[in-house]
Amino acid sequence: MRDARLFKGREAEIGEIADSLRNGNSLVVVYGAGRVGKTSLLQYMHDHSLKHEFASVLVEMQGLASFCETTFWSTVANKLVNEAAIRSYVGRVGIRHLHSAFKRMRDDPFKAFRRGLEKAKDLVGGRRLLIMIDDFTMLDELWPREEALRAAYQLKSLIEEHCGAAFILCVHETFYKTALSEKIATWPLLRAGIPLRLDHLDRQAAERLIRDPLGEMMTYSDEAVEEMLSLTACHPYYLQCMLYELIGHVAGERRRMVTSDDLRAVIPRVLQAGTHYFADLLQHVKGVTGVVVAALAHVSGRDNAEAAPDEIQASLQDYGFAISQSKLLRSLEHLRDTGVIERREEPRGPLYRIRIPLFGHWLLENRSLSMISSVRQER
């Protein structure tokens, strides 16, 4: 997301990252649920909020041509050279020096990168180098294990040597928690960083995301804004999905005011495309967890009321699902850890509900407990 008009909030998180880097820390690990805005945060910091203080580059792991050490360090090196040229940090002579310093990447990519990094540090005019790596999760998920271990060790050694550069790594929240508990390849590296969790927007920032981008070209009734905030729980991606549908709907009728009636008119379109919009959530609701979240949606209804485990289990039993209390609680906690549902503690026990009510509506219409039960009986 390169349009700064669509980036709202996150002032506290940006300030925390900047302060951490100013205080001499060399690694910040940003983690959060899918589509909550991690990539947008890196892009905004690179393009706007940190560009005057840091010489930053943004590396997207999804864009790597192959999953190996040579490709990784070559890509970061090319980003440094190209960014220096674009930002005019070093001039033509400096660019030639950088190209020369990064030679022989194929012979020993990490050694060549380290040599080039030293030269880049000397050429950026007092700015601190900042290397931001998005989708760092891919290192463990797609790389051969030995390659992943080596790259993680090399990055960690750069950080520990105080090489003059700082790093921001972006990972999915589920992966981050798994890495710390299961000690996978990147665990020592992630553990060494300052953690920062990215969550949904606060209400003020979410309202700005609705009202500000188009200014007077599109206005929203207070009721429509309140309903959007409630349905999306201030999640930036789902807000933008609804805004996309709303703007098309209202523009087609040549109007500028969005009302609650318009919102109700486009909700079916959003739900119809739910398998696309909710893809990140759906990957966590398979098997038993899929049945459990359907039961929670059934008990909560369209008002998304909180439900106790006993109520959820009774609903499961009504539809012929024999899931033990312990398995139910494990499933609920897994759904909570992955951001699908939320929990509130009460003296009589925990209460659960689906975190994004719009997703609950989709479940009721497309993957309800009765539908799952019917499919099960047909088999």
Image (tube, rainbow, N blue to C red):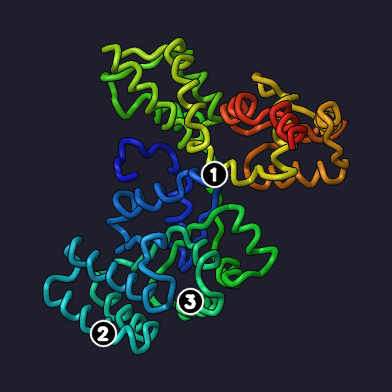
| Sequence-wise first label, 2 or 3 | 2
Disc 2 is placed on an element classified as loop
* For discs 1 and 2, the disc positioned in front in the rendered view: 1
**Image location of residue 254, percent across then percent down:** 26, 12
SS class, disc 3: helix
Viewer-side label of 3, 1: 1
Residue furthest out toward the left: 92
Q: Which mark is residue 190?
A: none
Q: Quadrant of the N terminus?
A: top left
Q: Residues within 10 Å of mark 2 (few under 14, many from 20)?
A: some
Amino acid at the residue labelled 2: Lys
Q: Residue at x 29, y 51 (%)?
A: 47
Q: Which mark is residue 103?
A: 2
- Residue neighbourhood size for the residue with mark 3, other residues' Cα within 10 Å, grouped as few (<14), some (14–19), many (≥20): many
Tell me where residue 171 appears, x and y as whole percent.
52, 57
For the residues labelled 1 and 2, say whether their Cβ atoms are less than 8 Å apart: no
Name the residue that disc number 3 marks.
151
Foreground of the two, 305 or 248 = 248
Relative placement, left or right, of 147 versus 303 is: left
Looking at the image, can residue 78 be seen?
yes
Kind of residue sitting beneath label 1: Asp
Give the residue at x 58% y 41%: 281
Identity of the residue furthest to the front in this view: 378
Q: Which mark is residue 280?
A: 1
Which residue does the image show at 60% across and 28% down from the upper left? 366
Mark 3 vs mark 1: which is more N-terminal? 3
The amino acid sitting under disc 3 is: Ala
Q: Quadrant of residue 347?
A: top right
Image location of residue 186, percent across then percent down? 57, 70
In the displayed structure, 148 sits above or below 15; it is below
Mark 1 or mark 2, earlier in chain? 2
